Amino acid sequence: MAQRHPYPNLPEVDQALDPGGLIRESYRIEGLGLPEARSIFLDWAIKTDPELAPQIAIRRLLALYAPLGGPEHPMTVVLTEGLGKLSGPGGRRGGSRARRG
């Protein structure tokens, strides 16, 4: 079982951005692995207000917590992966107008 590691400089939880402080707490868990970080991220995504834009929320979470955990921290890796998947190709592009020249 992972142990909690105190980070005295973690910012206060913004409940709209991080309901229940799930992401914040993940940075306090010593020995957190990628599978656990992905599970926490999924819980966060389910609990987040649907009105909140995921890309903006993830960028804000990274700005708040990534400097404390560093780029190698599993939650930083998962958040970065999530951001990359959201900003990837958005589906079909081109269509008939592109082929007409």
Image (spheres, helix red, strand yellow):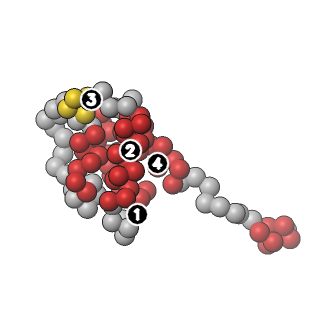
Q: Where is residue 93, by image quadrant?
A: bottom right
Q: CA distance from mark 1 to mark 3?
A: 33 Å
Q: Of marks 4 and 3, which one's residue comes earlier in the chain? A: 3
* Type of amino acid at the residue the image marks with label 1: Ala
Quarter of the rendering occupied by the C terminus: bottom right
Q: Which is more foreground, mark 3 or mark 2? A: 3
Q: Which residue is mark 4?
A: 82
Q: Can residue 64 be spotted in the picture?
A: no
Residue 91 lies, with reference to residue 24, above or below; the image says below
Instruction: Kindly state the secondary structure of the residue where label 1 is placed.
Output: loop
Q: CA distance from mark 3 to mark 2?
A: 15 Å
| First reached walking from the N terminus: tag 1 or tag 4 | 1
Q: Along the polypeptide, which appears first: circle 4 or circle 2?
A: 2
Other residues around mark 1 within 10 Å, as few (<14) / some (14–19) / many (≥20): few
Crowdedness near tag 2: few (<14), some (14–19) or many (≥20) residues, C-alpha within 10 Å: few
Q: Secondary structure at mark 4?
A: helix
N-terminal-most mark, 1 or 3: 3
**To which residue does mark 2 refer?**
39
**Callout 4–callout 3 Cβ contact below 8 Å:** no
